[in-house]
Image (cartoon, rainbow, N blue to C red):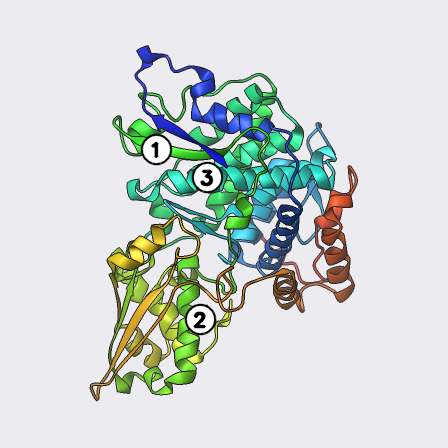
């Protein structure tokens, strides 16, 4: 059971009591010393493996090279021994480890997701939590509890409060969730966590232009910035510094001016005291390196490649119409009105938010690769460009309803497709969820997480290091205080590119 909390805007003279403020209720959940269920622990381990997979595959991409170089200029601070930078193991101040490692995790857009009223990648909570845990010498049990809280808060905020319709980036839910998770990890009191959550939210509200039009490298940096801000917010709150109050409900606060306005009303579900934090079990990871709403479409396109090879040749095709949810149509479909989504010279960040491109390439290739499917040569192939321009999307009310459904058995992120051939033949098919989804054709379990890690680490990490990491992470509940350095991975000699561009630091 959860308790549903009514959240609205209050005028200053109404003087909303602290314990009735959403940030305080979040803090109370974070401070609750409830045990973590075994199945939640198992999923936490899965997601640490998943994050490591996608981070190791990103180590020489430009955003990571830059973020890592920045981090390496900030040595461990005096409050602990520092945290390790992913891939190399050098210690830096924890907020900078959260920054560098957060960019590495997000860069390929290839880790876990939760979609409801808003979007999220809850695995973005892990880099700041692991960094602080390494810095202060926490145990594996401490880290598991912190991660469970981070997921719980982010998932429940995403269920209740839509940011994207007001063009606010989804990391505005990540700042508070990471701060709450850090509160649990460190065993902080409710008041300190309350101030941390408020500061983290206040400093992480930004526009969605980072995911619109010509998408820049900031897309990977945005969640890392939120994690870094959460670490800094906790540090300030621990030193007795306070945050804007009430941050959500105030008449000049986030809801009144950035979201639904002074007449807004939300219902936010949160666990009751003593209730286990299980929200991580509602989340799902990616088999393919692309926006989550593209996962099912890649799987359907691969199926159509096998069953209807004639549809892969633009000479045979008159049109391709994808009927899907409002979100998919308007965010990664033609409803976004972004000409860049049809441009063969678009950035990788833009292409992984273009369902017309993704569906076309997966249909033609019958497969998807996190590097090759986005290469400039692949995007510019003439027959691909021709077929790509024929793909459009439209909203289907039923798929929108299922997208928003709170019934997990019918909630979906897919749709139907109509491929009209030049001879008049119409090929139709549909898919509700990705194959790797818990209700999909091939749900991800530990075996699949490990296989994803081994696949992405191949050639980048020595085999002995792969085995060492996997053995360590599967022992996470038993790792004693100070042993969390074992969750870092070292790349093979010569893999890391240290020729970073020069900056200010």
Q: Which residue, as the protein is rendered here, is positioned at the far front? A: 1
User: Which quarter of the rendering shows the C terminus?
Assistant: top right
Q: For mark 1, give the secondary structure.
A: strand
* Mark identifier at residue 299: 2
Q: Residue at x 76, y 50 (%)?
A: 475
Q: Nearer the viewer, residue 289 or 97?
A: 289
Say whether residue 248 is visible. yes
The alpha-carbon separation of the residues under discs 2 and 3 comes to: 28 Å
The alpha-carbon separation of the residues under discs 3 and 1 comes to: 12 Å
State which quadrant residue 57 falls in.
Answer: bottom right
Instruction: Return the x and y of residue 242 as percentages of the image width and height.
Output: 50, 18
Q: Nearer the viewer, residue 502 or 24?
A: 24
Instruction: Return the x and y of residue 412 as percentages of the image width and height.
Output: 39, 58
Q: Earlier in the sequence, mark 2 or mark 3?
A: 3
Instruction: Return the x and y of residue 406 as percentages of the image width and height.
Output: 39, 48
The alpha-carbon separation of the residues under discs 1 and 2 comes to: 35 Å
Q: For mark 2, give the secondary structure.
A: helix
Q: Which residue is mark 3?
A: 156
Q: Nearer the viewer, residue 430 or 162?
A: 430
Q: Which residue is mark 1?
A: 266
Q: Earlier in the sequence, mark 3 or mark 1?
A: 3
Closer to viewer: mark 2 or mark 3? 3
Q: Residue at x 31, y 10 (%)?
A: 13
Q: Is residue 45 above or below residue 150?
A: below
On the picture, is 381 further left or further right than 27? left
Instruction: Return the x and y of residue 235 as percentages of the image width and height.
Output: 60, 26
């Amino acid at each position: 059971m959860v308790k549903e909390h009514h959240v609205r805007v209050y005028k200053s003279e109404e003087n909303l009591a602290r314990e009735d403020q959403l940030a305080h209720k979040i803090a109370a959940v974070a401070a609750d010393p409830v045990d973590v269920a075994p199945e939640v622990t198992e999923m936490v381990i899965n997601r640490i493996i998943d994050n490591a997979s996608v981070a190791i595959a990103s180590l020489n991409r430009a955003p990571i090279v830059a973020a890592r170089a920045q981090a390496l200029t900030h040595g461990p601070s005096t409050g602990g021994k520092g945290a390790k930078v992913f891939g190399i193991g050098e210690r830096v101040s924890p907020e900078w480890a959260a920054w560098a490692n957060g960019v590495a995790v997000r860069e390929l857009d290839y880790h876990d997701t939760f979609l409801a009223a808003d979007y999220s990648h809850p695995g973005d909570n892990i880099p700041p939590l692991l960094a602080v845990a390494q810095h202060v010498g926490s145990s594996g049990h401490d880290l598991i509890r912190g991660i469970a809280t981070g997921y719980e808060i982010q998932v429940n905020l995403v269920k209740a409060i839509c940011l994207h319709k007001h063009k606010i980036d989804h990391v505005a839910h990540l700042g508070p969730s990471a701060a709450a998770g850090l509160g649990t990890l460190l065993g902080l009191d409710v008041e300190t966590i309350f101030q941390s959550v408020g500061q983290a939210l206040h400093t992480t509200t930004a526009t969605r232009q980072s995911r619109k039009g010509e998408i820049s490298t900031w897309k990977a940096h945005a969640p890392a910035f939120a994690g870094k801000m959460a670490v800094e917010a906790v540090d300030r709150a621990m030193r007795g510094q306070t945050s804007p109050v009430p941050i959500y409900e105030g008449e000049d606060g986030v809801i009144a001016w950035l979201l639904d306005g002074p007449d807004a009303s939300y219902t936010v579900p949160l666990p009751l005291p003593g209730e286990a934090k299980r929200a991580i079990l509602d989340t799902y990871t990616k088999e393919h390196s692309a926006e989550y709403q593209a996962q099912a479409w890649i799987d359907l396109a691969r199926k159509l490649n096998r069953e209807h090879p004639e549809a892969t040749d633009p000479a045979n095709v008159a049109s391709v119409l994808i009927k899907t949810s409002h979100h998919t149509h308007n965010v990664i479909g033609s409803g976004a009105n972004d000409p860049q989504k049809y441009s063969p010279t678009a950035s990788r960040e833009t292409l992984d938010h273009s369902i017309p491109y993704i569906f076309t390439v997966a249909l033609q290739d019958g497969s998807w690769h996190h590097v090759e499917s986005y290469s400039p040569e692949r995007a510019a192939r003439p027959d691909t460009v021709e077929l790509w321009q024929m793909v459009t999307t439209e909203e289907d009310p039923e798929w929108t309803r299922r997208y928003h459904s709170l019934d997990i058995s019918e909630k979906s992120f897919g749709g139907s497709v109509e491929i009209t051939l030049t001879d008049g033949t119409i090929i139709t098919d549909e898919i509700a969820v990705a194959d790797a989804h818990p209700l999909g054709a091939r749900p991800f379990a530990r075996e699949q997480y490990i296989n994803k890690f081994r696949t992405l680490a191949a050639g980048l990490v020595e085999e002995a290091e792969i085995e060492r990491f996997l053995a360590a992470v599967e022992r996470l509940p038993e790792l004693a205080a100070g042993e969390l350095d074992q969750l870092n991975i070292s790349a093979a000699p010569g893999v890391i590119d240290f020729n970073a561009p020069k900056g200010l630091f």
